[in-house]
Structures are given as structure tokens and as C-alpha cells.
Amino acid sequence: MLQIQGSELPDSRFLDALRQVKYPFLVAHVTPDADAIGSALGLATAMREQGIEAAIGLPEGCVADKLLFMLSLAPETPLKSTWTPNDPFDAAIVLDTAGEKRINIQPVIDLSGNLPVFNIDHHITNTDFGQYNWVDPHATSTCELVARLLKKLDWSLSPAVASLLYAGIHGDTAGFSLPTTSADALHTAGELVRCGADVTHIGEQLCRSQARPDFELLRRVYDQTTITSDGQIAYSYLSHDDFLASGSKAEAIDDQVSIPLALKGVRIAMLFSEGEKGVVRINLRGEGNVEVLEIAQRFGGGGHAHAAGVRVRNKPIQDVAREVVAAATEHLKTHLIKSVDA
Ligand SMILES: [Mn+2]
């Protein structure tokens, strides 16, 4: 049994309603990362172990090759690639998803109230789109929230569920190194290991299993990194041609922005990538006390204080980069003035 200290828990209205659910449909965000897959598949699998007929929504081909190992941790949990309003589900549980537009299923789930929607998330920008909302922006990950929830429900955890949740916490904290990594989060991870989370397997899969095409993409990220003259901003780009030449795919973009971020002295790192023709994805990271969410929001994106993202359509990647780098430079100046004032 999990012995975790959670700071926040869902309210009793949320818990009472969740306890009534018999046939839930679980879904997370588009371009799912380890936290999205871990929280949806982990909770669905834990529910199935309690006799609840849970299924998860995951469109075919949306999972990056390097995260496919997570699906094989729970092969019995049914995956559905589409959602039909006639499906006999009695609830939708949306995890790790800041807003309804980011829900990873088509057609988008009916949020009009015909079906109870539970919203479990840690994005500060979450729009509280569910009938039952539990959003804790201080949590490292939605997987950490799911671990707390399972503890509150007093459900035991199988090694598979523990591994899925551990992988999500590992993913969203960049291996327990981001500022969100609280003592509670480390304690939760420890308890998951006690329940059978396979640290070696997950570490190998997430950190040491780069496929050749994705490795080729990394070479280009290094090669195409630009550092501003003051050394505080570093960014790289991957054009659509880079994807074609390396043989890598749009879904492979995950934490490659950690390459420019790894440079000493860099406060803001960015990666511009055009995995899908005509769509420029921007990953932003802020080091130390530098937050990047505001920059992302200026261009219509969202995410977390120190890790945010944007998608820009139908604009050349160089133009997007120029504008966002200018905004980041401006942001850093204001930030420095603020910190001198403080
Ligand atoms: Mn997350």
C-alpha cells in the first residue's frame, strides 16, 4: 500500500462521484508525453484491477517510439483510437490536459454535461473544463496526483501501475531535477519503487534508448544551436527537411530542448521544430527562477512556469524563431529589472 504524503487531494464531491464510476473513458493530451500516457494508462489499469471497466483513448500512431514501452507495461488495458458519443461510457476522465482543445481524441469528448467529466491536472493554465476538477499546479506531474488519488482511495498498486506513474514523474521532472521536484514528489516516487516500479527499465527506456533516427535529429539540434551574445539565451531549430533527412518523426520531439538548456549560463532555451509540415512547434525552458510561460502565452501557447510550448501554423520557421527570440530577450530584460527591484 502506498504511504505517501500528498499536499492536496480532490474534494469529497469529486471523490464521491468518482467512486460511482463503472465504465470510464480516460484520455490525456495530444502528442502525449510520459506523464500523459503514465497517468491515463496508470489510472485506467489501477481501475481495471479494481474491477472497473476502464478504457483509454489513444489515436493510432500518436505515441512516440521511445514511449511505446509504456503501452507494453499494461497490455490488457483497452486502447480506443476514436470516441463515439454512442459508446456506453459513464464518465470521461481527462488527465494532464490544460484545456479542451488539447484533448487527444476525435471527435472531441462531449463536455456539455451529458457525461460527467473529471479533470485531473497540474497545468497552471488549466481551464477547469470538467464537472469535477482537481488541478494542483504545485505537483510535478499528473502521475504524482494519480498516486495520491490511489492512496486516498486505498487501492493497492501493481508493479505495472507503479512503473507507469513513476515514468510520468521521471519524465515531467527531467529525471527529478526540475524546480517542481518537491520532497513530497521524491517521497511518492520512493513509494512507487516500493510498490514495484522498475527504475532500471524506465531509466533505460527514457534516457538510454535513443533510436538511430532520433539520435540523428539530436546531432542537428547540437549543430544548429545559436547562443545570444550575452550567453543567456540558446536556441536551436529542426526544419521539416531535418526530419525527412534523419528519418525521425514529429512525435519524437520531447525534451531535445534540454540540449541548448544544458549550456552553462543559459537562462532561456528554445527549440523550434517543424515535424509536421506547416506547423512550427516551440519548446521553451527557463532555468533557475526564470519563467517562460508568459512568453509562450504571448504566442498562444501554454504549459508550466519553467516548461512551456507553442504551436504556430503557416509561418516560416525562421520568422517564428526571430519573433520568439526577440520576445525572450525582452522578457529576460524585464525579469532582470524585476529581480534587481526585489
Ligand atoms: Mn504533465
Image (cartoon, rainbow, N blue to C red):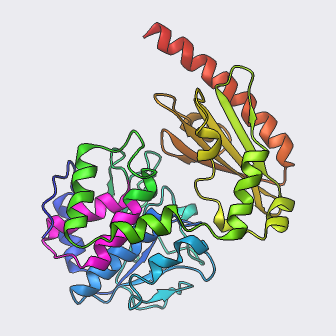
User: Residue 164 colored magenta?
Assistant: yes
Q: Which image quarter has ligand 1?
A: bottom left
The answer to which image quadrant residue 327 occupies is: top right
Residue 14 in sight in this render: no
Side of 185 where 3 appears, left or right: left
User: Residue 295 colored magenta?
Assistant: no
Name the residue nearer the viewer: 151 or 11: 151
Q: Position of residue 71 (x, y in %)?
A: 46, 81
The residue depicted at 82 percent of the width and 55 percent of the height is: 239
Quadrant of the snapshot with the N terminus:
bottom left
Side of 1 where 289 appears, left or right: right
Name the residue nearer the viewer: 13 or 163: 163
Picture layout, residue 217 above or below residue 223: below
Q: Which residue in the rendered view is the most extreme toward the top?
A: 341
The residue depicted at 43 percent of the width and 45 percent of the height is: 124
Quadrant of the snapshot with the C terminus:
top left
The residue depicted at 43 percent of the width and 90 percent of the height is: 78
Picture layout, residue 17 above or below residue 178: below
Q: Position of residue 334 (x, y in %)?
A: 59, 17
Question: Which SS type dominates the magenta stretch?
Answer: helix
Name the residue nearer the viewer: 268 or 261: 261
Picture layout, residue 10 above or below residue 158: above
* Magenta highlight range: 141-168
Residue 77 in sight in this render: yes
Q: Position of residue 201 (x, y in %)?
A: 40, 72
